Image (cartoon, coloured by chain):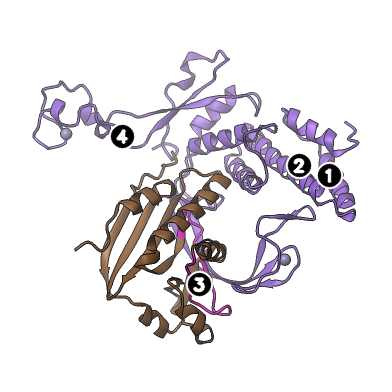
Chain colours: A purple, B brown
């Protein structure tokens, strides 16, 4: 495809539903942006920054899809995280009700996929930071002394961020709900169980094809096959019907997920007998 | 499976004996800003962390942005707010946690409702801008009323903050 202006690229990105993006887009956008910045057309330069971000969000997302097809799970996980981070930069600058680039779809699929990964523990870095610089003008920033650039705003087609100059790493902590999702804790002697993802990837043909997750809870074994007047297994000494019956207490607190494709015939056994533990063979 | 955080919204009200005077005498108090800081009804104060046998007075990450927001918002209500540290001693402690911690605030009881409004609108803007409706937050307050003081600790959903805080009675004997 031969792009002649940014409007063509915008159309290309909003219609995009393939596995590979045209790499030419990036260099084209860069040169258009330079031109607008030279003419001090801040608005158009900002719109091109938006297209660059959209490109990155889509690029990381489809790369994650391709990695999943190749069973490179951890690599896919990191790409999904990158896609999500690039998307979070965009949210301040776009109208989310008009989703012409399918960003809401990508965001939803990213969340769904993350739920299907077996990762539970992450390394989280603690650090003490002092001294920042503005990424736009390079001036140093202190509490009461700032340049005129606002964090997260777009100047000359670039987003203003703060660059930490002086960072002291203090410690690592193991956490279950990290901000940096790439730091998955890997244990040498154990292998993660990706069975659900692998099963999904057998059926999911295109990264822009939709499916949804159905959240289910399993009844705990001690609550199986109880009659209403049985003594409740929770040791309350009450009758089941007057105690835990019809309450969330009877369910295991970890949900399991079923993948549902709306417009597609998939084999019946598809959603059955999937082992959903964190680790392989346990 | 990835576990979804299900910690309930929790607010604790504890007795405290902190005063503004104690803050003015603390080792991190910037003498050169004494005049301005002593006028304030709302002050962001640091917490002490010990790591590798070093002690640091630190603020949670993003406090610089929160400081701008707090000062601007409260000024419109004619309340003076500031941060109790010099520029050169200002440090952020990065935890990279999904839970957003907000700097500890010492506040005169009269300014407390405005402070709640300020934080809830800060959270609202953050939440709508970001891709995260289930954001968890942590905030600590030291609320001072004459000679009495209470420590208030909130941990839970950003979206329930305002409602939860407005429901509590602090200085009820
Ligand atoms: Zn600047
Ligand atoms: Zn029971």
In the rendered structure, which disc, 1 or 2, sits on the residue that comes first in sequence?
A: 1
- How far apart marks 1 and 4 lie (CA) works out to 51 Å
In what element is the residue under mark 3? strand
Asked whether A68 or A13 is in front, the reply is A13
Q: Residue at x 49, y 37 (%)?
A: A115
Whether tag 4 and tag 2 are in contact, CB under 8 A, the answer is no
Please report, as a chain letter, where disc 4 is located.
A
Badges 1 and 2, same chain? yes
Circles 1, 2 touching at the beta carbon (< 8 Å): yes
For label 1, the residue is A29
Circles 2 and 3 in contact, beta carbons < 8 Å: no
Percent position of residue B90, x then y:
54, 75
Between marks 1 and 4 in the image, the one whose residue lies nearer the viewer: 1
Residue at screen point 72% across, 45% down:
A53
Residues behind callouts 1 and 4 on a single chain: yes
**Magenta span has B99?**
yes
Q: What is the magenta range?
A: B78-101
How would you classify the magenta stretch by its main secondary structure? loop
| Residue under label 4 | A252
Q: Is residue B8 above or below residue A263?
A: below
Q: Is residue B77 visible?
A: yes
Check chain identity for marks 2 and 3: say if they share one. Answer: no
Reading the image, the residue beneath label 2 is A51
- Marks 1 and 2, how far apart at CA: 8 Å
- Chain letter of the residue beneath label 3 in the structure image: B
């Amino acid at each position: 495809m031969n792009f002649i202006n940014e409007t063509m690229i915008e159309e290309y990105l909003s219609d995009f539903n393939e596995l590979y993006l045209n790499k030419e887009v990036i260099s084209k956008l860069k040169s258009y942006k330079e031109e607008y910045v030279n003419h001090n057309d801040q608005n158009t330069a900002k719109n091109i920054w938006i297209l660059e971000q959209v490109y990155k969000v889509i690029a990381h997302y489809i790369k994650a899809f391709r990695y999943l097809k190749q069973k490179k799970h951890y690599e896919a996980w990191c790409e999904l995280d990158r896609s999500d981070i690039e998307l979070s930069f965009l949210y301040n600058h776009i109208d989310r009700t008009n989703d012409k680039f399918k960003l809401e779809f990508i965001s939803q699929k990213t969340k769904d996929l993350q739920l299907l990964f077996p990762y539970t523990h992450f390394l989280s870095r603690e650090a003490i930071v002092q001294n920042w610089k503005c990424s736009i003008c390079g001036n140093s920033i202190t509490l009461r002394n700032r340049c005129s650039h606002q964090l997260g705003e777009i100047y000359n087609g670039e987003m203003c961020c703060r660059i930490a100059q002086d960072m002291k790493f203090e410690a690592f902590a193991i956490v279950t709900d990290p901000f940096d999702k790439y730091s998955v804790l890997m244990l040498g002697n154990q292998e993660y169980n990706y069975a659900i993802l692998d099963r999904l990837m057998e059926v999911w043909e295109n990264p822009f094809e939709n499916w949804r997750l159905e959240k289910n809870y399993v009844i705990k074994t001690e609550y199986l096959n109880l009659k209403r007047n049985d003594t409740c297994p929770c040791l309350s000494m009450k009758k089941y019907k007057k105690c835990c019956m019809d309450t969330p207490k009877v369910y295991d607190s970890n949900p399991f997920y079923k993948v549902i494709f709306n417009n597609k015939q998939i084999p019946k056994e598809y959603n059955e007998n999937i082992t959903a533990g964190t680790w392989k063979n346990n | 499976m990835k576990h979804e955080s299900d910690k309930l919204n929790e607010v604790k009200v504890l007795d405290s004996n902190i005063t503004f005077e104690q803050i003015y005498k603390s080792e991190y108090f910037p003498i050169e800003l004494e005049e301005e800081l002593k006028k304030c009804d709302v002050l962001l104060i640091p917490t002490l962390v010990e790591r590798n046998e070093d002690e640091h007075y630190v603020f949670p990450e993003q406090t610089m942005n929160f400081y701008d927001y707090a000062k601007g918002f409260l000024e419109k209500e004619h309340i003076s707010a500031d941060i109790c540290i010099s520029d050169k001693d200002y440090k952020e402690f990065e935890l990279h946690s999904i839970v957003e911690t907000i700097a500890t605030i010492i506040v005169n009881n009269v300014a407390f409702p405005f402070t709640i409004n300020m934080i809830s609108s800060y959270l609202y803007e953050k939440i709508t801008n970001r891709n995260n409706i289930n954001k968890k937050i942590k905030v600590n307050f030291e609320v001072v009323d004459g000679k009495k003081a209470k420590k208030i600790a909130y941990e839970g959903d950003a979206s329930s903050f305002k409602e939860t805080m407005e429901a509590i009675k602090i200085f009820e004997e």
